[in-house]
Image: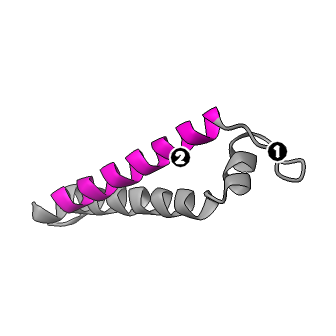
Amino acid sequence: MKKMILGALFFGVGFVGVLALSIVAAFNPWSYNGIGGLRGSLLGTGMMFPFILFFAIGVVGIVICVYEAYIKK
């Protein structure tokens, strides 16, 4: 049960991080060498690595929760 809570916290942190970076990118449009949209804004502001990091943290959280809920006996 404790690992399930840890997974949920990881997912929550990842979700909030991705959401915050997406909102910042939406309010600061940027064109990075002809690349527009979310990707161009993240590249232009230097926030691509944190975005990928938060996304990975969220995926790890989902994997932990699924493992604890369905696979573990």
Image quadrant containing the C terminus: bottom left
**Residue drawn 55% across and 61% down?**
52
Q: Position of residue 70 (x, y in %)?
A: 24, 56
Q: Nearer the viewer, residue 24 or 53?
A: 24
Residue assigned mark 1 = 31
**Residue drawn 89% across and 47% down?**
34
Principal secondary structure, stretch drawn in magenta: helix
**Residue drawn 26% across and 59% down?**
7
Q: Nearer the viewer, residue 37 or 3?
A: 37
Which element type, helix, strand or loop, lies under badge 2? helix
Query: Quick check: 64 left or right of 26?
Result: left
In this picture, is 38 found above or below 63?
A: above
Q: Which residues are magenta?
A: 5-27
In this picture, is 52 found above or below 42?
A: below
Q: Amino acid at mark 1?
A: Ser
Q: Position of residue 24 (x, y in %)?
A: 56, 40
Q: Earlier in the sequence, mark 1 or mark 2?
A: 2
The crowding category of the residue bearing disc 1, from other C-alpha atoms within 10 Å (few below 14, some 14 to 19, many at least 20), is some
Q: Amino acid at mark 2?
A: Leu
Callout count: 2
Image quadrant containing the N terminus: bottom left
Mark 1–mark 2 distance (CA, rounded to whole Å): 16 Å
Which element type, helix, strand or loop, lies under badge 1? loop
Q: Position of residue 27 (x, y in %)?
A: 62, 33
Query: Quick check: 42 left or right of 70?
Result: right
Residue assigned mark 2 = 21
Query: Quick check: 11 left or right of 72?
Result: right
